[in-house]
Image (cartoon, coloured by chain):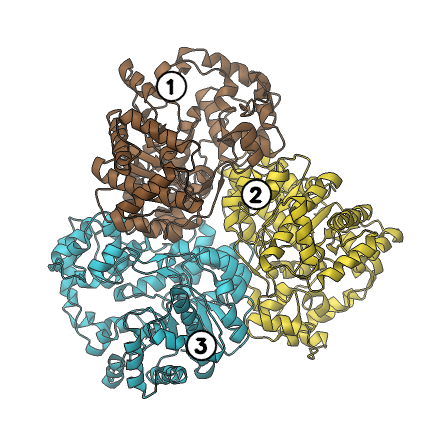
Chain colours: A yellow, B cyan, C brown
């Protein structure tokens, strides 16, 4: 029995479906460009086998465990590590059974599509996952994970990944990336410069992080100029390790462009832990503009991922820490927020800033009009909660008419669930082909244009936008 | 001539339409669970005949009369009672003719679907309502209303209503519900605890309402602890009369969780009429959290209906009072608003809080992410302006991918238009079957899952979520 | 080869497509009512030939050049006049080639639909525009522009325009309109009263504009009463020249209804250049209410176009001035914003205020509920970024269920791109017919109703709402 439908996500109308299928056939086997995500480079450095099915599919995946939590399953019962020392389930088979018995919760969600795709196409399962089939599925996955063909590098190759970018702290030594480079393996796994902890005055221990930045770079990071120079040095180091991009996860898209003396004074306040919340926000905003200026110089593509209220549940954060499925989107303002940065560098054709949003209302109202005017701006694909068939369709419908296709940058899987990567790219390719087929069949695009666009959206735009 | 299309609201694609019809056939005749609405329990207590067609379809239905008002028909001409003593039309046939002559205004609206459904399936009309057919329609409806088969209890039984919840002031003596219980009639009509007037310091005569609460319960409602105890007592009374839920209609979703001493001081200020607008809002927010804690104890399901700017038109409110079609939605913030309550009780698996919204942008951005994480939260169906084919479709498309189906609670008709209840549930069942069929035909759900989901969405989820 | 598909924008489902086509056939050739736009009346006064293809299609059209700019083409290279004296490209053929070589950027946008429609149906081109076909297209268009059949009046007649409204400063002498009237040509080109520069205290040189208003009218515009009288006089002058409407482009929908003495004091502050930003906003809001009161008296239909952040890019504004594609939408608030005005005049059935939005979220949440209640309010069609197939579909789906069709006013092309007028109305008619066909095929509208609605949406509603 197939767990996935060969015509999934194509339009219902037979004519449009046939065309979507034809377009998809052109792009289904293209290499995967994964320019932004959260895979662990240590997987590919060490190439150790994945520990067990629960550790692969359940424990690290907040999409999966939050859904079970929402229906009353305690996080501890799913083996999610605690932050306060409380005991959690350690038997992977018990965790797997709990997951399997609740698999119906994922009906209609992208998680179901991704998981079924991996179950069928990566692990050869043929029965829907239920309480009854849980053990057989566990055994089959476990047996395969024990084989060399299911080690990280082998799967990377099998998945057809041409390039995979990880996301790495500015203070990371990138030893895993070095180890990959030194290993002789041909897989391209590159870092991304993510300086959040050293640009956010509200990071616990901010000053000591800045000191570490100084130690790593030999710069006097207690001075504003030295601090900026240290960022430049780390960016250069990341570039030498293969990075082509930076990434910035701020609470908002607020930017600033202060006179240097004011920025320097604000930085001192931040170092002294004396910033108000408003000043901390201003400093983060200033640093986005500084990073954009550095991008102009060093060519790193800049990504901005704003708008998540991290760790919304106080108790869950206290008990289990970060990334536990309790990051909730907020309303965003790109029009006012980005203006200082855009007045500074928005008209630079050599600069690429890729914007992501967790507030879909900004797609047609703010993002597409901005990206459809400023040369420096491009739109990232639907992110996180919108990385789904409907989310992708809404994104195309909301943005294409205003900024076209060429101000978008193809797909990001943005995942830490390695085995979902082929499934996620497959979903994006199918949804885009469905959209293109719909445009053709409703007289808004010629078929030859659609063929070219299918390739561009699946492969070329990501590669070019991220300078890969 | 049929006023309703047997395939209405199904997908256009023939394959999906066939499947939607098959799914619908499974659920079309299921009993109606109506866990939230505004029917008058006195109808079923007294079982008097409905007075006339205008009193049944026009005068009490703000969906209907506001549309005519928007095109220049004065409220007074439609028999809507005035608040300032001005005379209003009293001849039901004249009112009916005005309504009939403007029936084209409802083209494309859910009101047209509901009204045509009632006209055809409840009253056997066969001609579209127009100025020309107005009198014949009036006469036919009037003749039927005079028969016993069209008295409230008979219609309740004929409509297949398994349970109907009304919405009742905390100060209501529930005598109508008692009368129903004592009557020997088998219909299940239960109250819902709606304490708005005794938790909102901005209610005119707030302190005297609180005094009445004291008289009813024997508690010292001039003290914070006595006030809370009085709520507990009234909730218990409502429970004994069959209630399984409370309902809260606040201007916003703002909650608070103050230390008891601060809450007590704020309550005294409220009693003294000394709250600023911000303090009144804070008190309402505090009471949502208090009510959630009481729900944890007594098991009443909590509903929150925030975000309506009541009585937007000053002149209409002065002349005609409340519920005159001039309640307008506002932007909502659930993420910040609910945090205090959620930090207090959001992780309780035994608690059920059902959230409604008048701001659709919150569905994908806030509500689905929150309900897809917090065990205490569930999403109510599309409400009021969104209780429609497109509103329901958008709701499913915006929420399912993030929180699945099982964090939703089936349908509420939320109506005071009794004869529209079958039509409204029919619309919901059709739209959900259309959505499920679309998922199946696009490879996102198996057909056996869709059959189960159709039943769940039409019947089981409402029954379970509301503990009926 | 056809550049446009005869079935473009119709539904994919064959049954619905057939019905949409049948509905469209009823309305395709109806005269064009263009009640709001930005054509230059001087075209029709002088009836000079259009200078060249670049001046017709590229240089004045911010939809077109901003897209090229967004991909790195400098504004100066497209011949857009500069504000700071920098040289810009002057060779129209060079500009045209740049445009043609980037025509793929418009894939999936309404610009592509409009341009291809004009290329094929106005200029007879048969090959898609590319770098290769650029010169031949240029030559063919240029040759036709040199003929009398392509002069403005001839095209106006050929396009089937029954009435075209321009948008004119309150200080404009309307000499072009007078010249048209005096010319004996039968085309109806009427002005619209747009007083933005004389109601906005933040207009550079506000006081001197007010003085000019005084000179034009003989009123003492340094007094509040004289200022209002001057507006009344100018409105009367516009009416005599054929105007039936006023238009107001404010940053927000904020209104006010101050006591006359406060309004007068605020006006003096505005004249003295002493308003804070908040006071300037308050004055603009007061003037919307004043204009609504004048509309009650003189019968001019009032249009409000709020919510654009004009000239978002500081550098582009400094270098190239206004209307350069850098006007970006903002979040809007109609519910709070309009309340003072609506409390004053919202229930007046003789008043027509047409609301436009650049924030789609307000369509279902605010605009449809307001227009579905207040007799004075109607909804304008999707505006600017939403004047597109998806934007129009979303508009109908978001508003019809709440305020029906009859609180909307048909289509506005709102364009300064003269040759796009037939294309834009064609798109609107097709999308509306597609929507109506979908309603019929899903049982939400009868076919005879759809036929009537197609005519109403294409012609009658615009004509009646604008009192043409």
Marks 1 & 2 on one chain: no
Compared with A399, C141 (above or below) is: above
Labelled pair 1, 2 in contact (Cβ < 8 Å): no
Q: What element carries label 1?
A: helix
* Residue occupying the point 45% across, 58% down: B395
Q: Where is residue B117 in the image (x, y as percent from the top left)?
A: 28, 59
Q: Is mark 3 on a helix, strand or loop?
A: helix
Labelled pair 3, 2 in contact (Cβ < 8 Å): no
In three-dimensional space, the C-alpha distance between marks 1 and 3, rounded to whole angstroms, equals: 69 Å
- Near mark 3 (Cα within 10 A), the count class, few <14, some 14-19 or many ≥20, is some
Chain for numbered disc 3: B
* Residue occupying the point 54% across, 35% down: A445
User: Closer to the camera, B14 or A182?
Assistant: A182
Compared with A455, A108 (above or below) is: below
Residue carrying label 2: A339
Residue carrying label 1: C42
- Near mark 2 (Cα within 10 A), the count class, few <14, some 14-19 or many ≥20, is many
Q: Position of residue B439 (x, y in %)?
A: 51, 57
Q: Position of residue C310 (x, y in %)?
A: 48, 37
Horizontally, is A435 left or right of B40 in the view?
right
Dividing the image into 4 quarters, which one contains the N terminus of chain A?
bottom right
Dividing the image into 4 quarters, which one contains the C terminus of chain A?
top right
Q: Which of marks 3 and 2 is in front?
A: 3
Chain for numbered disc 1: C
Q: Can residue B459 be seen in this view?
A: no
User: Closer to the camera, C133 or C195?
Assistant: C195
In three-dimensional space, the C-alpha distance between marks 1 and 2, rounded to whole angstroms, equals: 37 Å
Q: Residue B263 carries which label?
A: 3
Q: Where is residue B162 in the image (x, y as percent from the top left)?
A: 34, 75
Horizontally, is C196 left or right of C138 in the view?
left
């Amino acid at each position: 029995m197939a767990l996935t439908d060969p015509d999934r996500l194509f339009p219902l109308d037979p004519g449009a479906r046939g065309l979507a299928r034809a377009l998809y056939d052109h792009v289904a086997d293209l290499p995967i460009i994964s320019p932004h995500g959260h895979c662990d480079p240590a997987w590919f450095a060490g190439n150790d086998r994945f520990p067990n099915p629960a550790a692969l599919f359940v424990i690290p995946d907040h999409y999966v465990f939050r859904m079970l939590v929402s229906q009353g399953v305690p996080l501890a019962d799913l083996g999610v590590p605690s932050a306060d020392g409380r005991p959690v389930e350690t038997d992977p088979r018990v965790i797997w059974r709990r997951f399997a018995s609740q698999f119906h919760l994922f009906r209609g969600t992208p998680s179901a599509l991704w998981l079924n795709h991996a179950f069928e196409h990566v692990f050869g399962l043929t029965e829907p996952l239920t309480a009854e089939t849980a053990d057989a599925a566990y055994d089959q996955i476990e047996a395969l994970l024990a084989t060399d063909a299911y080690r990280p590098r082998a799967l990377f190759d099998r998945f057809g990944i041409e390039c995979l970018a990880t996301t790495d702290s500015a203070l990371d030594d990138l030893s895993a990336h070095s180890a990959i480079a030194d290993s002789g393996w041909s897989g391209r796994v590159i870092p991304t410069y993510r300086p959040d902890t050293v640009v956010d005055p509200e990071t616990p221990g901010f000053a000591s992080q800045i000191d570490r930045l100084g130690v790593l770079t030999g710069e006097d990071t207690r001075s504003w100029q030295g601090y900026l120079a240290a960022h430049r040095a780390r960016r250069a180091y990341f570039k030498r390790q293969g990075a082509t991009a930076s990434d910035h996860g701020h609470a908002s898209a607020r930017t600033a462009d202060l006179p240097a003396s004011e920025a320097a004074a604000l930085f001192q306040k931040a170092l002294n832990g004396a910033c108000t919340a408003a000043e901390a926000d201003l400093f983060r905003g200033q640093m986005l503009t500084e990073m954009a200026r550095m991008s102009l110089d060093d060519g790193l593509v800049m990504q901005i991922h704003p708008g998540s209220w991290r760790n919304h549940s106080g108790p869950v954060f206290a008990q289990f820490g970060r990334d536990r499925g309790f990051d909730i989107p907020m309303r965003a303002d790109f029009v006012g927020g980005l203006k200082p940065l855009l007045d500074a560098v928005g008209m630079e054709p050599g600069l690429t800033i890729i914007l992501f949003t967790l507030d879909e209302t900004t797609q047609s109202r703010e993002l597409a009009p901005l990206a459809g005017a400023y040369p420096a701006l491009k739109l990232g694909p639907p992110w996180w909660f919108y990385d789904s068939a409907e989310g992708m369709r809404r994104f195309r419908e909301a943005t294409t008419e205003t900024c076209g296709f060429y101000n978008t940058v193809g797909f990001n899987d943005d995942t830490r669930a390695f085995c979902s990567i082929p499934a996620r790219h497959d979903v994006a390719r199918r949804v885009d082909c469905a959209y293109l087929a719909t445009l053709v069949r409703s007289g808004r695009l010629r078929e030859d244009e659609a063929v070219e666009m299918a390739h561009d959206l699946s492969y070329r735009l990501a590669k070019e936008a991220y300078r890969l």
